[in-house]
Amino acid sequence: MKPMLIGGEWRTDADDVIVSVNPADGRTNHEVAAAGVRHVGAAVEAAAAAAGAWRDMLPHKRARVLAKIADGIEARSEQFARLQMIENGKVLAECRTQAASAAATFRYYAAVCETLGDDVNPARGPYLSMTLHEPYGVVAAITPWNSPLTMEAQKVAPALAAGNAVILKPSEVTPSGAIALGEVALEAGLPPGLLSILPGTGAVAGDALVRHPGVKCVSFTGGTGSGRRIAAIAAEKLMPVALELGGKSPHIVFADADIDAAVASVADGIFEGTGQSCVAGSRLFVERRIHDRVLALVAERARRLRLDLPDAPGAQVGPLATFAHRVRVEQCIETARAEGGRIVAGGGRPGDAHLAAGAFCLPTVVAGLTNDATVCRQEIFGPVLCVLPFDDEDDLVRQSNDSVYGLAAGLWTADFRRAWRVARRLEAGTVWINTYKQLSIAAPFGGYKDSGLGREKGIGGLRLYQQAKSLYLGLGG
């Protein structure tokens, strides 16, 4: 049984067990000890005890530990990649990229930790004014199953760099990468208690973490419903939270765009990771005079994608992360049909015998609906693309922004003035122009509206885990 990490000790004294299932073949991967309320209490106690010395450690010394964690992830990158692959079904090539990204994130925040300074403010009297930034103490990080390697690094690295102790609760679907991160952190010399790993359910371990009075800040990535519940608890505690939630991102193609490049990007933007991405471009808006052409090209590309076992050579699309999630995605496709949608590609399961035991779903393209259709309003979180026409910029912006979500958007055009106008009008935290899903750890990331609160990544991603304190040193006689 895989253990949890509390106060530098590996423990299996769980009251419940998580059974990890490989979505590619339905076989059991392993069992994992599931944290309960008492484990949360022990982790918070250990974190609080360890946080003081870590906070007082000179930044360049904290940075050395973070850099060693990056080295450890790189040394075990294949292990990290395969652990993610067998738990959520992402193709191995993407898992390897995400393992490399996790190491780079720790290295980036090691650099930020060592070089970021505090502020000296302009004086308005006989004093010296400074703004210091201090850690909250104990931070809870709650991560999803779709990209755990990158998400965990994006929360743990800046929170540690900011001087906090961190309690990481990974998704019960993908706990192993977090457990491996705990191993690497201890090997790198991170003092015991500064990073605890609590696999468990959101209803038990997650809820207990958010409610615990010793937890002073929560960072959560996941569904909007769960985010609302966390925000409600945080409001009662007057506790800061960072919430990166759902999306229904518009991907836009104007008639003057490089059509071949746009079509390739559209397909990657929705079908990579089997559509299980918060920034997946799930609503494709195409200028009406090229709508039919682009629809045909995207559908043909969807049909040509290689759906296969995640570690098969050349695999481009793997299974969905769980069998239960496939049922939900298939229900969404049936809803699209019932509301008059035309399935142009996909719409079912593959017929290949060697994929029959897995949670596979064909890349699906739906046409003939309006932006009011259920599948155009709800986040499906699967390989389902809805293609919609637009007439002009005003029509496009109206339809694109007609969503409760506002996480990301992309647009393709040869007219940079139009690109600037439209990008500024779109209600989204990230807008890509003539590209899609390019992400940098150095750039802020988050959403508008129901897509969340706060911004992760970048220098602000470290400040997210600190609070400001103003100091005044009197210089008068």
Image: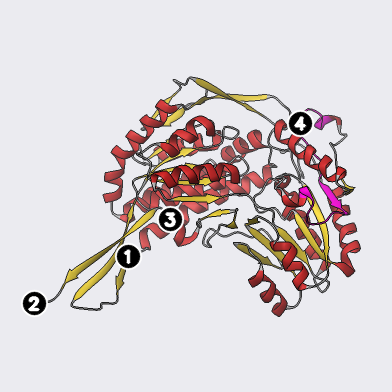
What x and y, as percent, mark residue 245?
Answer: 59, 49
Distance between the alpha carbons at the discs numbered 1 and 4: 52 Å
Mark with earlier residue (2, 4)? 4
Which residue position holds label 4?
A: 358
Question: Could you tell whether 309 is left or right of 157 in the image?
Answer: right
Q: Nearer the viewer, mark 3 or mark 2?
A: 2
Looking at the image, residue 283 lies above or below residue 129: above
Q: Nearer the viewer, mark 4 or mark 3?
A: 3
Residue 74 appears in the picture as rendered: no
Q: Secondary structure at mark 2?
A: loop
Question: Could you tell whether 233 is left or right of 126 in the image?
Answer: right
Q: Secondary structure at mark 3?
A: loop
Q: Looking at this rendering, what residue extends furthest in the left direction? A: 477
Asked if residue 468 is among those painted magenta in the image, a careful observer would answer: no
Q: Nearer the viewer, mark 2 or mark 4?
A: 2
The local crowd at label 3, few if under 14, some if 14 to 19, many if 20 or more residues have their Cα within 10 Å, is: many
Tell me which residue sits at (85%, 38%) in the image: 348
Q: Which residues are magenta?
A: 354-375
Check contact, mark 4 vs mark 3: CB within 8 A: no
Mark with earlier residue (3, 1)? 1
Which residue position holds label 2?
A: 477
Mark with earlier residue (1, 2)? 1
Check contact, mark 1 vs mark 2: CB within 8 A: no
Distance between the alpha carbons at the discs numbered 1 and 2: 27 Å
| Residue type, label 1 | Asp
What x and y, as percent, mark residue 389?
Answer: 84, 63
Looking at the image, residue 225 lies above or below residue 176: below
| Residue type, label 4 | Gly
Which residue position holds label 1?
A: 118
